[in-house]
Amino acid sequence: MKPETRNPKRVLIAEDEPSIVLSLEFLLKGAGYDVTVATDGNQAQHLAESLIPDLIVLDIMLPLLDGFEVCRRIRKNKKLGHAKILMLTARGHESAVKKSLMLGADAYMTKPFSTRELVGTIAELLAP
Amino acid sequence: MLTGSTIVLASFAYVGLLFAIAYYGDKRADAGRSIIANPYIYALSLAVYCTSWTFYGSVGRAATSGIGFLPIYLGPTLMAALWWYVMLKIIRISKANRITSIADFIASRYGKSHMLGGLVTIIAVIGVVPYIALQLKAISTSFSIILKYPEVVMPDKAGAPLFLGDNTFYIAMLLAAFTILFGTRHLDATERHEGLVAAIAFESVVKLLAFMAVGLFVTFGMYGGFTDIFDRATEIPHLTALLMLGGESGNYTTWASLTFLSMLAIMFLPRQFQVAVVENVDERHLNKAIWLFPLYLLAINVFVLPIALGGLMHFPNGGVDADTFVLTLPMAQQQPLLALLAFIGGLSAATGMVIVETIALSTMACNDLVMPVLLRMKWLRLNEQPDLSRLLLGIRRGAIVVILVLGYIYFYLAGEAYALVSIGLISFSAVAQFGPAIIGGIFWKGGTRTGAAWGLSAGFLVWLYTLLLPSFAKSGWLPITFLSQGMFGIDLLKPQQLFGLHGLDDITHCLFWSMLANIGCYAGISLLQRSSAAEHSQATLFVDVLKQSSAAAGSRFWRGSASVDDLLALLSRFLGPERARDAFTVYAGSRGGKTLQALAADADLVHYAESLLAGTIGSASARAMIASVVREEPLGIDEVMTIIDEASQVLAYSRQLEQKSHELESATNELRSANQRLQELDRLKDDFISTVTHELRTPLTSIRAFSEILNDNPQLDPAQRSKFLGIVIKESERLTRLINQVLDLAKIESGSAEWHSGDIDMREVLEDSVTAVSQIFRDQNVMLNINVPEALPLIAADRDRLMQVMLNLLSNAAKFCERPDGRVNVTLAQEDGTLRVDVADNGIGISPADQEIIFDKFRQVGDTLTQKPKGSGLGLAISREIISHFGGRLWVTSAVGTGSTFSFTLPIKAGSKFQVSNQSAKSKPGRIST
C-alpha cells in the first residue's frame, strides 16, 4: 500500500520531555493517527527510516542528535520524500525558524502551543 | 728787490714745492712705503691748527690783550692730555666704521642718518666760511703790504670791487685750484691723502721756522733778548698792563670760555678731524702727539709777546696794524729776505688751512649733502650708471669752488670789521656745536638721533643769531639797530645781550646760550625718547668700541645674502673698476691667501664692501647702496633664540605625539580585548536567556497542553483526569521552582540578593535539612547518616541559604544514588579555621569531564544518559554562589562507579564561642528505617 493512501496516517513524535510526549500522544491518538515516539535524535532517525511515517513531529532540543540534524538526514533520504515535518520547539528565535524552513521542514510551531492549532496544522499537513 | 713778480714767483715756487712733496708722498704710499707712517709727521700735521691766525693774529691779539692771546693754545694743550682716551676712542670708532668726516661720524653714530649728516655739513660749511675768509684776508693783506716794500703802508681799506676787480678773489680762485689739485685727483675709499699729509707736515715746519726766525730777529736782533724787551715794555705804562692777567687781557670768564672753545675746536674743526682721525695711520702715534703737539704750540708762541711788544714799541701810535707786525717789523728793519720768509710763512699757514679745511668740507658736502639728495632723485637713474666716480669727483671740485667763493663773499662783507682773531673765534663757536653730539655719542648710549638733531639745530641757530648776524651788522650789512635794540625792537632779543644777559663778551655770551640750547635739547629729547634698533646697535658699537674686538663689530648685527659679482659691480661704480678689484683682492688675500675667484659673499665681505663705499660716499649712502644689491635679513640674538626655541618645541611636540600614539595603541588593544570579552559575555547571556526561555517554556507547554485537553475532553475517565491534573500541578511546581531559582541566581549574581547573616550553629542546619529530606529518602529507599561533633564554633552565615545548599546537595545525592542500597553520609568537622561539610553518596559517580560542568547553569549530568534527571540544573550553581558569598568553597570528589562526595567549607567566625551540644558525638543514624 502506498504511504500516501495509507489510513490511518502514521505519525512519529520525537520529543524527550515525558509530559509533553504524553500530551502529544493523547492528542494525536485522539485524532486517529498511528503514533510512535522517539525520545532522542538517533532513535528518531532510525524509526523514521524504518517506519516511513507520513508526518514527523520533531523537537529541536533532542539528546544525542538535535532536531536540525535529524531533519537534514530525513530530507536527504529519498524514501522519506513525502513525509511532512513539523518542527516543535521552545526556541522562538527567528533564526531557528529560518533554519528549519531552510532545512526542509514543512511547518514550525513554538511551545507552549495551542492544542487546537497543533491538531489543526497536522490535519492540514496530512490532508491528501 | 722785492718786486711783485719776485713775490709771486716765490709764492708759486713754494706751492710747487708743496706739490712735489705731496706727489712724492702719494707715490710712496702707492708703492706701500709710506713716508708718513711716523709719529713726528703725525704730530706736525696736527699743527695745521696754527693758521695765519697764529702767524699774524696772535701778535695782533697780544698787542691789545697781552697774554690774552694764550687761551686758544691752552685749550689744545689741555685737550691733548685727554687724547689718550677720547681721541683714541674716536680714532678706533672711525677706523672700525670707515668714517671719513665729522658729518659721517655723527650720522653714523645716530643710526646712519642722512639728515644728521646733511645738517652737520651745513653747520660746518657755514661755520668755517668765516675762518676761510680770515685766511684770505691774511694772504691778501700780507701780499699788499709786502708789495709796498720797503715802505710799510697799510693796505687801502676803501671798498675794493667785488669779484673780478679784487685781488682777493683771484687768490681765492688760486687756492681753489691748488685744493682741487691736491685733493681730488682720485677717489680713495679711505679718504686718505698721504701726499697731502706730508705736504702739511712740511708746511708746519716752514711756518714754525719762519715765525721763529722773525721772533729771534726781533728779540735778539732788534733788542737785547727777552729780558731786554720786557724791561723796556714795563717802562711804558700801557704796555705793562698787557703783561698782567686781568683787565685788558680779559677776565676769568673770557679765559675760561676761550679755553673751552679751543678744546672743542682742536677736535671738531673739520681740518683737525681730517688730519687727526681720518689721516691717522697708527693709533700709537697718538702717544707721541700728546706731548709733541703742545711742544709745537709752545715753540710757536714763545715769540708772540716779544714781537707784539717790539712792534708796539717800534710802531707807536697804532699806525701799523698789529696783525701785521710779523711782516712789517722785518720790513721796517730792511730785511727783505726775512720779510719774504715771513710772507711765505704766513702764506704757508694760510694755504695749509685752506686746502685741508676745504677738502674736508667738500668731502662732507659731497658725501653727506649732495649725494644723498641725488640718490633720492630716482629719475636721475644714478643706480644704472656704471661709473659714478667721475660724478663724485666733479661734485667735490664744485664744492671746493663754492666754498672758496663763499669765503670770499664773507671776507668782502664782513672781513674789514674784525680783527683776525675775532673772526676765527666765530668759527670756533660754530664747530663747538658738534661737541655735545660727538662727546655724548661716544660716552652715552642714550643719545638719540632726534636729540642730536635738535641739539645741533638749536645751538647753530643761537650761534647764527648771537654771532654771525651781528658780524654782518657790525660791517654795516644789517641795520645796527639789530644789535642795539634787538630783533623787532624787542629788548630781550638783543643778539649779544640775549634775555638781558649782559656783561659778557660776545664769545662767552654766544657760548653760554648756544651750549645751553644745544645740550639742553640733546639730553632732554634723548631722555624722552627711546632709540631705534639701528641707533642702538650703532650706539653700542661706538660707546663700547674699546671693549670689543674690532673685526666682528660691524657684521654682528647684519645678515643677508649677496653675490660677489654684485658687490664688485657696485664698488666699481664708485671707486672705479681697478680700485674695486684691488680692494677685493687685498681682502681675499687677507682671508687666508684666497684669490678673488674664491671669495665668498659672506657677511664679512659685505661689511667690508660697505666700509669701502662709506669712505667714498658716506656711511648713510653706502648703507642704502649695499641694501639695494643685497637681500638683507637682519638677524639678532633674539631671532636665533626664537629659532632654537621653535626647534625644541617641535621636538617636544613630536615626542608627545609619539607617546600619545603609543597610548592610543595600547588603549585600542584594551578596547579590542574588552570587546571580545563583552561579546563572549553577550553570547553567554544569550545562551543563558535562551536556555532559561527553553526551560521555562517546557513545563508551560505541558501545563497548557493538558489544561486544554482537560478542558476539551470533559468525558475523560477519572483516572486519566487525575493523571493529567497531576501533571499540570507538577509542572506548575516545576515552573515555579525554576522561576524562583532563576530569579534567585540572578539576584545573587547581580549582588542584589538579601543576605541575613547571623551566628549559625551548623549542626542545627544539618539536622534540620536532614529532617526536611527524610521523606524523599524514604520514598527512594536511601539510607541517610549524619555525623556531627559535639562542640563547634559558630559561623556567620544566612541560615536559610545554608539550608538551601544542604537541601540541594542532599536531593542531588538522593537522585544519583545506587539503587537499591543507596547510602548518603553527611559529615561535619572542624578543619584549619573552617568548618567542613561532606555529603557522600554511593552512586554512579561523575566523570572528571563532568565534574566542572555540573556547577554550570542548567548543565546536568544526564544529558548523556537516556534518562533525563530531575531537577532544573541550577541547584549546584546557586549553591556554589551561596558558599562563595560566605567565603567558602564547594567542590566535588568523585570517580565513576564509586560514588561522589560533595564538600564545602565555611570560615569560622573570628572569636566565636564554642557551642557545646548536649548530644553525644557519636554517629547518629538517620531516622530512616533500613
Image (cartoon, coloured by chain):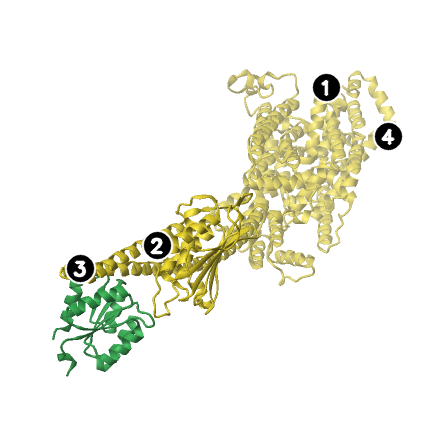
How far is the residue under mark 2 from the one under mark 1? 129 Å
Seen from the viewer's position, the closer of residues B27 and A60 is A60
**A61 is higher (above) or lower (below) than B825:** below
Q: Which chain contains the residue that carries disc 1? A: B
User: x, y percentage for residue B674?
Assistant: 43, 57
Q: Which chain contains the residue that carries disc 3? A: B
Q: Secondary structure at mark 1?
A: loop
Of mark 1 and mark 4, the one earlier in the sequence is 4
How far is the residue under mark 3 from the one under mark 2? 30 Å
Quarter the N terminus of chain B occupies: top right
Q: According to the image, label 1 marks what residue?
A: B251
Give the amino acid at mark 4. Answer: Phe
Quadrant in the picture for residue B358: top right
Q: According to the image, label 2 marks what residue?
A: B742
Q: Which chain contains the residue that carries disc 2? A: B
Of mark 2 and mark 4, the one earlier in the sequence is 4
How crowded is the residue under tag 1: few (<14 C-alpha within 10 Å), some, or many (20+)? some
Marks 3 and 1: in contact by CB < 8 Å? no
How far is the residue under mark 4 from the one under mark 3? 175 Å
Visual hue assigned to chain A: green
Q: What residue occupies the far front of the structure in this picture?
A: B929
Marks 1 and 2: in contact by CB < 8 Å? no
Give the amino acid at mark 3. Answer: Leu
Q: Are marks 2 and 1 on the same chain?
A: yes
Q: Are marks 4 and 3 on the same chain?
A: yes
Q: According to the image, label 3 marks what residue?
A: B710
Between disc 2 and disc 1, the foreground one is 2
Q: Secondary structure at mark 3?
A: helix
